Amino acid sequence: MKLVFVGYMASGKSAIAKELSTALNLELIDLDAYIEKQEEASISQIFTDRGEVYFRKKENHYLIDLLNQDTSFILSVGGGTPCFTGNIKIIREKAVSIYLKASVQTIYKRIINEKSKRPLVAEIPDQDLKEFIAKHLFERAPYYKKASYTVNVDDKSVKELGKEIYELVVRSSNA
């Protein structure tokens, strides 16, 4: 089984993927970390040196490589991954995908104090951050909603979400 988590930044993709990788005893792969290893450069360095078009082509290439493997794993992808080069269609065809849906308020609360670690929002003034998130989320949501399942993450702990998704995945794999 391949399980792929999609959603906006700070929706909990990495934390929940880690929780489930332990529960399901599956390898955990972070697509951005995988790309960095393959390209021998950080994501921000790739964007700076080669541009977004190059990055999106490589992202698509490595996503397909991973999803074509015969092994089972849990994959956490970047917030933009499903929105480019037909990636959400590829993910749907090759894996069980889960959209971790977070409200604008939840995302805002999670990133307001760590903006500097997130290049997409690092330069956005605090007073404009909610509006940026809302607009960006509105643009990306149609892609995220194409995932196999949608799970609302608002006001839930990683443990609660892990249990909810575990039951969802086990139920679907036994159907």
Image (cartoon, rainbow, N blue to C red):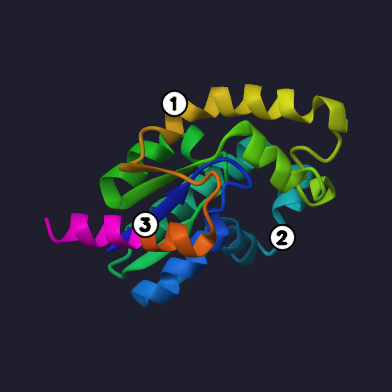
Q: In this view, does 96 lie to the left or right of 38?
A: left
Q: Which of marks 1 and 2 is nearer the N terminus?
A: 2
Judged from the image, the secondary structure of the residue bearing numbered disc 1 is helix
Q: Where is residue 26 in the image (x, y as percent from the top left)?
A: 38, 73
Task: Give the label, 3 or 2, closer to the camera.
Answer: 3
Q: Is residue 52 left or right of residue 172?
A: right
Residue assigned mark 2:
41
Q: Which of 160 and 19 is in front in this view?
A: 160
Pointer 3 with pointer 2, Cβ within 8 A: no
As drawn, the label of residue 132 is none
Is residue 93 located in the magenta-colored stretch of the structure?
Answer: no
Residue assigned mark 3:
164
Judged from the image, the secondary structure of the residue bearing numbered disc 3 is helix
Pointer 3 with pointer 1, Cβ within 8 A: no
Amino acid type, mark 1: Pro
Alpha carbon separation for disc pair 3 and 2: 36 Å
For the point 38% across and 63% down, the residue is 163
Q: Can residue 84 be seen in this view?
A: no
Q: Earlier in the sequence, mark 3 or mark 1?
A: 1
Q: Nearer the viewer, residue 47 or 106?
A: 106
Q: Which quarter of the rendering shows the N terminus?
A: bottom left
Q: Which quarter of the rendering shows the C terminus?
A: bottom left
Q: Where is residue 44 in the image (x, y as percent from the top left)?
A: 75, 49
Amino acid type, mark 2: Ala
Q: How crowded is mark 1: few (under 14 residues within 10 Å), some or many (20 or more)?
A: few
Quick check: 137 above or below 155?
above
- Which residues are the magenta region? 165-175
Q: Position of residue 82 (x, y in %)?
A: 47, 39
Name the image quarter holding residue 106.
top right
Name the image quarter holding residue 87.
top left
Residue assigned mark 1:
142
Is residue 171 located in the magenta-colored stretch of the structure?
Answer: yes
